[in-house]
Amino acid sequence: MVSSFIVTGFLGSGKTTLLLNSIKEHFKDKKIAIIVNEFGEVGIDGKILKNVYSEVLEISEGCICCKLSAEFEKGVTEILQKYNPEIIFVETSGTSEPFPIFLSLQNLQISVEGIICVIDTKNFENYKEHSTAKYQIGGSNILVLNKIDLVDEDTINKVQKEVKAIKEKYNIKNVLTGEPIFKRYAIYRAKFGVLPEEVFKGVFKIEDILDIGQKVYPTEHITEDSFYQRVIYLPEDIDFKYVEKLLSNLPKNIYRVKGIVKTKDIPVPILVNYSFGDVTFSEIPNYEGKSFLILIGSNLEDKQLIQLN
Ligand SMILES: Nc1nc2c(ncn2[C@@H]2O[C@H](COP(=O)(O)OP(=O)(O)OP(=O)(O)O)[C@@H](O)[C@H]2O)c(=O)[nH]1
Ligand SMILES: [Mg+2]
């Protein structure tokens, strides 16, 4: 039976980073395939992952947990036939809920070894009220307090307490019996998504619940959050300083920005990563497309975007 891990977590919490670091560390000798789902209209994570792994399938422009669930199942089937992987990793979009994806994998007879929810410990305060974040925690069995290098011990302890309380409240239950589906869960602390081997050893394997059936569980997005995304294309002769300035002046309702930009002053394209005010830049040498930024947030207004352009 093929095994799988689902990696969920809010926008920018560190899912792709966890995949890059954990697969490298623990799955060197395994035949793996990755399915990455992005909320944005232009996929970036697929490009990053493809730099390191060859079997990567990108599904963009919608959530595989609801709108694109048929496409997801088709994609998994194709990957199985084409690559015959031993393990499949699924990175859900930051706006997806993991449970419908878990059901889809089970329906395809794929064993789910763990549902990992990556939590941005530094920025948890900024997004913890989103119902998506609560259902992501409730629908996972391995909770990872990530980015602990950016906070002090008191903050980690406080976030851990809050995460536990959300887990207890939103833990997914079998609607027929009222029993929680994940009888146990574990909390880890991580920097750049580096996790101990035990997480991937099947210790947290979710017991088969094939008999639950899709009908009993909602396969629609159950949260009411609305997220919006816009892509802005930038001229290629801009200064790097302009990009920095743009990011430092973003309104609070735009909390995630990703993109690839080419600037006048730096010879290689730059990958831009912004979440809740934290910004990193890295080089992405093999990119040949246009310069763009994807802005993700709530209540995006056109006039804000015009000001940015
Ligand atoms: N300091 C620090 N930065 C981190 C850590 N993990 C991830 N990051 C940074 O956080 C940003 C977002 O990381 P990603 O791995 O792209 O996050 P993601 O959850 O895949 O984002 P989406 O797919 O857009 O939802 C990047 O700039 C990472 O370098 C960490 O543990 N510490
Ligand atoms: Mg990602």
Image: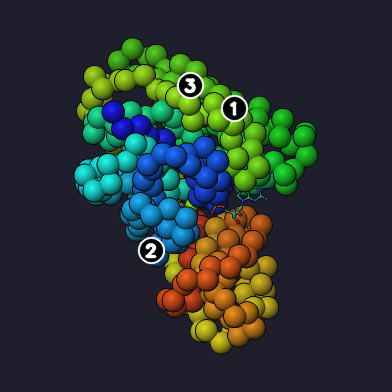
Mark closer to the chain start, 1 or 3: 1
For marks 1 and 2, give the CA distance: 32 Å
Q: Are marks 3 and 2 in contact (CB under 8 Å)?
A: no
Circle 2 packing at 10 Å, graded few (<14), some (14-19), many (20+), is: some
Instruction: Kindly identify the amino acid type of the residue bearing the numbered disc 3.
Output: Val
Residue plotted at (44% across, 67% down): 230
Circle 3 packing at 10 Å, graded few (<14), some (14-19), many (20+), is: few
Which percent across, then down, holds residue 6?
42, 37
The answer to whether the beta carbon of the residue marked 2 is less than 8 Å from any atom of ligand 1 is no
**Mark 1 lies on residue:** 187
Circle 1 packing at 10 Å, graded few (<14), some (14-19), many (20+), is: some
Which percent across, then down, holds residue 151?
74, 43
Instruction: Kindly identify the amino acid type of the residue bearing the numbered disc 2.
Output: Glu
Mark closer to the chain start, 3 or 2: 2
Instruction: Kindly identify the amino acid type of the residue bearing the numbered disc 1.
Output: Ile
Q: Secondary structure at mark 1?
A: strand
Q: Secondary structure at mark 3?
A: loop
What is the quadrant of residue 58 in the picture?
bottom left
Q: Is residue 263 above or below residue 301?
A: below
Q: Which mark is residue 203?
A: 3
The answer to whether the beta carbon of the residue marked 1 is less than 8 Å from any atom of ligand 1 is no
Residue plotted at (50% across, 80% down): 234
What is the quadrant of residue 209 in the picture?
top left
Which percent across, then down, holds residue 56?
37, 53
Q: Secondary structure at mark 2?
A: loop
Q: Nearer the viewer, residue 55 or 282?
A: 55
